[in-house]
Each structure stands twice: as C-alpha cells, then as structure tokens.
Amino acid sequence: MNSPSHLARAWGNELRTERNLDIASEVAEIAALLGSTATAVAIAWVLRRPGVTSVILGPRTLDQLTENLAGVDLDLPSDAAERLDAVSAQLR
C-alpha cells in the first residue's frame, strides 16, 4: 500500500492546488522567455531566496543532472524572480 507510486499519487493530489499550478505556470513561462527549462528556473529561483545556501538535487539520469546544474548557473533576472515571488505569495 505504501509503494513509491502510491506515495507519489497521494503527495501529488495534496500539492496540486491552484496556487501551486499558478507557480508552475509562471515558472514555465519564464523558462520559455529565457530559453531555459522550468527545472533550471525553479532551481535558480530557490537559490535566490533569502537564507537558502544550497539545494538538494535528485537526478536519476545524466540528462536530469545536466538540467539541474544549469539551474545553479542560471542568472535569473530580477524581474523574473519578482514575478515568481509575487505569484508564490498568494494566500494559501
């Protein structure tokens, strides 16, 4: 009953809120504007957050690792970070 896929479905439903979908949409839009990936933008944004000094990456493939590391090197423009901060500040 507590298989990884069962847990993923349970967590996925709990986290699939309008607010989180709005954040994901904004991340994807910014990624498209920057010619990057949503993963890279999300990692770059998290690294800009006050008090965050590192992120824990969990790639399963070399391609995923490459994409994750691109986020570490991505210079996220201030206006993009402000857009993400604004959409994530919505009431929960």
Image (tube, rainbow, N blue to C red):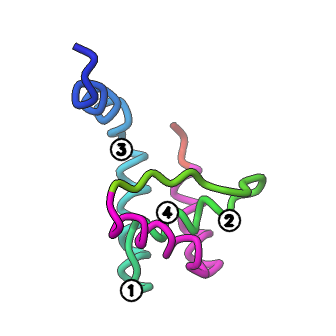
Q: Which residue is mark 2?
A: 48
For this orientation, the residue located farthest to the front is 62
For this orientation, the residue located farthest to the top is 1
Disc 3, disc 1: CB below 8 Å? no
- Local secondary structure at mark 3: helix
| Quarter-of-image position of residue 6 | top left
Secondary structure that dominates the magenta span: helix
Q: Amino acid at mark 2?
A: Arg
Q: CA distance from mark 4 to mark 1?
A: 14 Å
Disc 3 versus disc 4: nearer the observer = 4
Relative depth, front residue between 30 and 68: 68
Q: CA distance from mark 2 to mark 3?
A: 24 Å
* Label whose residue precedes the other's in the sequence (3 or 1): 3
Q: Amino acid at mark 1?
A: Gly
* Label whose residue precedes the other's in the sequence (3 or 4): 3
Residue 9 in the image: state x and y as whole percent: 24, 31
Q: Residues within 10 Å of mark 2 (few under 14, many from 20)?
A: some
The label shown at residue 18 is 3
Q: CA distance from mark 1 to mark 2?
A: 19 Å
The magenta segment: 61-89
Residue 74 in the image: state x and y as whole percent: 56, 79
* Label whose residue precedes the other's in the sequence (4 or 2): 4
Relative depth, front residue between 46 and 21: 46
Q: Residues within 10 Å of mark 3 (few under 14, many from 20)?
A: few
Q: Which residue is mark 1?
A: 35
Q: Which residue is mark 4?
A: 42
Disc 1, disc 2: CB below 8 Å? no
Q: CA distance from mark 3 to mark 4?
A: 18 Å
Q: Amino acid at mark 4?
A: Ala
Residue under the image location 54 percent in, 41 percent down: 91
